[in-house]
Structure formats: C-alpha cells, structure tokens
C-alpha cells in the first residue's frame, strides 16, 4: 500500500512516496540496514499482486493528502482502483484515519472489504462475524433532548431512548468544554424537539456499570444527518474503533469526513479555546432572590424563555437567557390535578395534564408574562406557545385544569380562561367527565393506621415553608390555627392605622415586619443583622410561616405586646424528616429534592407523627404522611425509595446495635433501610452512579 511513483507533469517530473488512502496492506520490510526484517502474513502476496498490475505501468494518481513526508492518494489502473482490488482479495484492511481523504468517499472500499470478510479469504481466513442487529428503521417525533447525544423519540405509542451513533460529545461537567456540550444540546433542541425524524438503528450498546443498554442510531431530519451536523460544527468528535469492530454508524465515513473539515476549520472543540456553559442563576431559590428579579419581569409585557422541566400541568422551570436566570413559573388562574410520583396515587387526570404539558411545552421556546409571586420564590403568570397560544387556556379548554374564578378575574387573560372553563365543563371534558372531580374529604379524627399502631399519635398539619435539605416548617391545624387567622386580621387592621416610625431592632428581637411579596405585616424574629455600605439589613424569620427574607428597617416596626408570643405561640414549628439525611440545595440532587418537596407538600394536608431524636437539638423530628396517597407508607419512606434521601448513619449504627443485642427494632426504620437497599439496586436518584 506504499509505492515510489514518478509523477509526470508537462514540464517537470517528481519522484515521490505515495501511501494509498483508506487502507493498509501487510508490511514487507527486508534488507534495510540497521533494521530487523519484518514480513507480515500475506505481505509478500500483496506485494506481488500490486507489482503484477502496476510496476512500470502508466497509472492515474489522485493526490488527496499528506502524511509526514509522504503523499496520500488513490491509484487507478486500466482494471480499476488498486485499493478496491487489494481489499476485495483480502490483501488489505480499511483504516479510519485516511478514509476521509478518499475522493468520492470510502463506501466502495468498505464494500470490497466486507465481501472479502464474507468469503473469509487471506487476512480474513479466521474472521468470525459479530452478531449484528437488523438495521431497523422507523419514523417518530422527538419529545425530549436527554443529553447532547441522547434523544427521546415517540414512535406509535412507544417512547424510545436513542443515542446518536459513533459520536463523542464534550463532557457537561468539565469546565473547559461544558459550553460546547451546552451548544450541542441547544443545537439538538432547536433542530429536533417536536419534529419528525427518521431513525436507523445501527447497533445496540450493551449495559455498563453506570449506563443502561442503549439503541444507537443514525438520526435524520429530512436528508440531514444530525450526527454529521454536530461533528461538522465542532460540537462532537468521532469515536475510533478497534480494527475488527463493525458496530458503528452506517454513515461512519461521512462522520470522519465532517470531522476532518471541522478540524481544518478549527471549529468548536477543535478551536483550542475553552468554553464554559452559560451562567444560570436560580431566581426562585428563595423569596429574597425572587423579589430581586420580580420588578424586572413584571415590567416586561412578555419575555422569551425555554421550558427546562415540567413539574405538573401548571408548574414549570423556565430558563430566561436574556436575564441569565431560571425561574419556577406557576400558571395563574387555574388549578391542575396533581400527578403522583412513582408509587403515589395521582388525582384524576393528573397524569394526563402532566403528559399534555410535556408534549406541548417541554424544551420549547415560549413567551412568559409574570403577574405575581408566591411565598417561596415562585412566579405566578402566563405561558404562551408559538402563535401566542395561552397554555393555561389550552389546559382549561381540554378539561385538564379548573379555572379559579376569583384569581382569573384579576388576570388580564381572565375572560379567555373563564370562557375555556365553561366550554370544557359544558362538554364534560377531562375532569368534568367525573361526577365530582375534587371531592371534599371531611376528617373528624385522625387515627394511626392499624399496621402502625406503635407509631406516635398523628396530628394534621401543613408545610408552611421548605428550607432545604431535611428541614421544613410545619403548621399544626387546630384551634390555634383559627386563632392565628383571627390574629392576622387584627394584625393587618392594626398596622393599616398605625403611623409610627421604623424601628432598628436587635438580634433575636420579636418585631412586626412587612413581607415584600404581598406588602402585608407579619410577626417576625430578627435572626441576623448585617451592614451593606452605610445601611443596616435584617434577616427576618416569619415565626408563623417559617420563611425568611432580608429587609431594611423601613419594613420593621416594634411588635405590640397584644400580638406577642404570650398571646399566641409561634405557629411555624421547625421540623426535620425523621431518620433521614437529605442533600442541601447546593449539593448534588439537592435541587431535584427541593422541587420534588414543593410538588408533593405545598397546599397539602398531611399527617405528622413526632418521633424521638438521638440528639438534643430541639428540632421537631417527624414522619409525614399524605393520607390521599397512602395511609401506611410515609413520605420519608418514599423519599428514600426514590433515591432522594438516605438513612442517617447514626440511626443505622443504633439499629445494628439493637439488632445485635437481640432486642426488638423499629419497624419504621426497618422499612427505611429496606427502601434504601431497593433504591441502590434500582440505581434510583443519588444511587444512579
């Protein structure tokens, strides 16, 4: 496959060394001073084969590249292409490094090699073909971009995860190349999401330690090969395979050609430049941060964004590139039925609403309009699809949401919402096909489930604030809740008529503080005093709700004695999930946990059971139950099963000690430990790797 060739031009001649593009024949090296002779099997036969056809003959040479001091090219003689002839006789192997140089592509060379393999001649006499799958082809719609080389395709009623064959994308967690990974994902999103594609399965990548089995395919939209597009833009490289590995893209040579062009043009990952992913600030991390961005978002009529995650039919994570923030957006004016997590019971049509939202808005370009805030950092507003279709109206019209008349009337899109709700109800669509879509459950007394008779007494409660990690604030429902409602009415009237100067409090002092999200006054305790420039700022814990924010003294007044904690104790009880360790928001899986807790705990009446602690921290340690989901399985247990929490090591050690002593162990802790083992086995959540 390497020759000395005399190149003849009209006025000059050159003697050069030429290597054939796209292949390599066995080596024949003899009588070279200072070098040991080397004659590989079939090397002599290959040499004779070429000499008999080319030596001292006129041939046509196509120069295609350079390798070191040698030219690389194709040689044609009267009977055809010598490279194809060598491969067809089993006297050479295709090599990937130079096949992109072959004029017209390397398809004919690959075909000639395959025929030699099938005949099992010469170099391929011991060849054993690897079992290859039938090249299944199908059409489908891309419903999700999972990663820079993995997409989800809906074909018929089946969703399939499809990896793009033979490409290697930049690593998302590698700071120097995370920006290129982001660009690759964005390219796939803008090109494919919601679009029809043609998929040709090339091979199955078997399951490995950290990854499930994957179907690898060539994906096209029209005549455009998406993998080739990624490679040509420098947003992916091409995987190099062992010489006998045929499990590769059916368009592998085109990928190599595209990569060669990208390298020469120094595009993307071949530019030698580092690129970090865009900064995304979580503006919904807490109410203080949300308030910083609220006025900007409120002033804009609409603002462009991308839906990154769908929590329910009416709750979304939206990335806003122009502001470099992501927000939690809750659709105003409607209530969607809640979809349960795996193992949980869903409200009627909750799963349908979630599926509808995923199909319509996930990873789509949207416009949003912000109209208000909730108390935990979420933004309340509207979301519009292409063509200014109001998604809340679409949900209401499909019978997948109930319109709240009061809040709808306060929205500028209220008439559309109310009209859509009336039409859906008249047509008995979705939730309105049920006799009573939202039955009111009257609970006179909460009893411990029969199976858990040894558990502490249950009390009805709601979560008033989610702090992060394993910490929450609870409000227990009862007589004191009613007293709080009355106190807040009196509290509001008192401050409406109050004309006193602001107050500069000390740390730990009980005060009246104005909450910036709704401009109402609440009881608070000063947790921390800081100075910013010449201005003092005060971190306030709202003692009846558990949320915190930092305000100036303009928002603080002295707390009148008739509203102090002697009149009514603080109603927000600092609590933690019993027996568990849970990641903080800035840790791995912390954001997933926080979003999940918001989804399953907000505005839900729960049963809370306080259990003994192993330390003296004074924090309420609880098992929480959602009676509409399960009377016997706690939320604590489900969090462990889903890999969002682990059993605390202190409890594990104590459990083993009690077990070793032959004493009776806690059935609740037994179940938590069992769930943790199941989560590990299923690679759920934080156990994925």
Image (cartoon, rainbow, N blue to C red):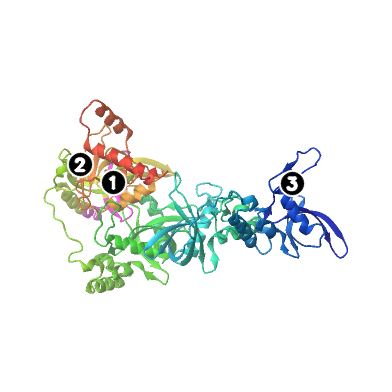
Label 2 SS:
strand
State if disc 1 and disc 3 touch (CB < 8 Å): no
Residue highlighted by disc 1: 638
Place residue 100 in its image quadrant: bottom right
Q: Where the C terminus falls, by quadrant?
A: top left
**Residue 669 location, x and y as percent?**
25, 37
* CA neighbours of label 3 inside 10 A, class few (<14), some (14 to 19), many (20+): some
Which residue carries the number 2 mark? 609
Residue 112 higher or lower than 558, as above or below:
below
| Distance from the alpha carbon under mark 3 to that under mark 1 | 68 Å
Q: As drawn, is 19 to the left or to the right of 283?
A: right
Locate residue 358, reporting x and y percent.
37, 61
- Name the residue nearer the viewer: 66 or 370: 66
Residue found at the very far right of the displayed protein: 11
Badge number at residue 28? 3
Spot the residue most to the left: 444
Q: Nearer the viewer, residue 570 or 401?
A: 401
Ranked by sequence position, the earlier of labels 1 and 2 is 2
Of the numbered discs 3 and 1, the one sitting upstream in the chain is 3
Left or right of residue 318, residue 270 in this image:
right
């Amino acid at each position: 496959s390497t020759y000395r060739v005399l190149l003849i031009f009209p006025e000059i001649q050159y003697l050069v060394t030429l290597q054939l593009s796209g292949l390599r024949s066995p080596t024949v090296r003899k009588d070279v001073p200072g070098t040991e002779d080397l004659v590989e099997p079939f090397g002599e036969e290959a040499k004779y084969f070429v000499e008999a056809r080319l030596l001292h003959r006129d041939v046509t040479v196509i120069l295609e590249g350079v390798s070191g001091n040698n030219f690389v090219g194709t040689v044609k003689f009267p009977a055809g292409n010598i490279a194809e002839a060598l491969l067809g006789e089993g006297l050479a192997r295709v090599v990937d490094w130079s096949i992109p140089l072959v004029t017209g592509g390397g398809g004919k060379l690959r075909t000639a090699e395959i025929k030699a393999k099938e005949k099992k001649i010469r170099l391929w006499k011991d060849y054993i073909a690897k079992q290859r799958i039938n090249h299944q082809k199908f059409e489908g719609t891309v419903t999700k971009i999972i990663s820079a080389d993995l997409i989800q395709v809906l074909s018929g009623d089946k969703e399939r995860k499809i990896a793009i064959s033979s490409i290697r994308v930049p690593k998302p967690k590698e700071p120097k190349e995370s920006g290129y990974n982001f660009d690759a994902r964005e390219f796939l999103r803008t090109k494919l999401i919601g679009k029809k594609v043609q998929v040709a399965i090339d091979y199955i990548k078997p399951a490995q330690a950290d990854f499930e089995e994957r179907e690898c395919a060539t994906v096209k939209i029209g005549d455009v090969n998406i993998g080739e597009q990624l490679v040509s833009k420098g947003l992916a490289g091409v995987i190099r395979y062992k010489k006998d590995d045929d499990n590769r893209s059916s368009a592998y040579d085109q990928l190599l050609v595209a990569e060669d062009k990208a390298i020469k043009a120094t595009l993307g990952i071949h530019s030698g430049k580092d690129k970090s992913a865009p900064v995304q600030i979580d503006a919904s991390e807490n109410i203080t941060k949300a308030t910083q961005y609220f006025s900007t978002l409120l002033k804009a009529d609409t603002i462009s964004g991308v839906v990154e995650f769908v929590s329910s039919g009416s709750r979304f994570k939206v990335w806003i590139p122009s502001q470099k923030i992501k927000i939690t957006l809750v659709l105003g004016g409607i209530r969607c039925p809640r979809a349960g997590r795996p193992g949980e019971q869903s409200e009627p049509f909750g799963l349908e609403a979630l599926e509808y939202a995923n199909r319509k808005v996930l990873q789509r370009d949207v416009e949003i309009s912000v109209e208000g805030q909730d108390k935990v950092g979420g933004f309340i507003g509207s979301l519009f699809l292409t063509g200014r279709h109001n998604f809340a109206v679409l949900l209401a019209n499909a019978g997948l949401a109930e319109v709240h008349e009061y809040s709808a009337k306060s929205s500028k899109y209220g008439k559309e919402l109310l009209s859509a709700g009336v039409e859906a109800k008249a047509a008995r669509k979705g939730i309105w096909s049920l006799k009573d879509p939202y039955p009111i459950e009257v609970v006179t007394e909460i009893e411990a489930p029969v199976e858990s008779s040894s558990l502490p007494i249950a009390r009805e409660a709601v979560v008033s604030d989610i702090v992060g990690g394993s910490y929450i604030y609870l409000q227990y429902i009862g007589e004191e809740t009613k007293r709080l409602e009355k106190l807040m009415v009196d509290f509001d009237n008192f401050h409406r008529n109050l004309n006193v100067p602001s107050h500069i409090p000390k740390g730990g002092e009980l005060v009246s503080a104005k909450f910036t999200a709704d401009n109402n006054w609440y009881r608070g305790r000063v947790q921390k005093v800081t100075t910013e420039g010449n201005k003092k700022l005060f971190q306030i814990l709202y003692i009846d709700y558990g949320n915190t924010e930092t305000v100036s003294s303009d928002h603080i007044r002295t707390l009148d004695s008739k509203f102090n904690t002697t009149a009514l104790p603080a109603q927000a009880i600092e609590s933690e999930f019993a027996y568990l360790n849970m990641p903080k928001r800035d840790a791995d899986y912390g954001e997933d946990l926080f979003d999940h807790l918001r989804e399953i705990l907000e505005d839900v009446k729960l049963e809370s059971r306080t259990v003994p602690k192993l330390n003296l921290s004074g924090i309420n340690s609880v098992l929480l139950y959602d009676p509409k989901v399960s009377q016997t399985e706690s939320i604590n247990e489900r969090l462990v099963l889903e890999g969002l929490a682990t059993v605390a090591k202190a409890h594990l050690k104590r459990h083993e000690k009690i077990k070793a002593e032959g004493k009776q162990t806690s059935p609740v802790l037994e179940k938590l430990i069992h769930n943790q083992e199941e989560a590990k086995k299923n690679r759920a959540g934080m156990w994925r790797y």
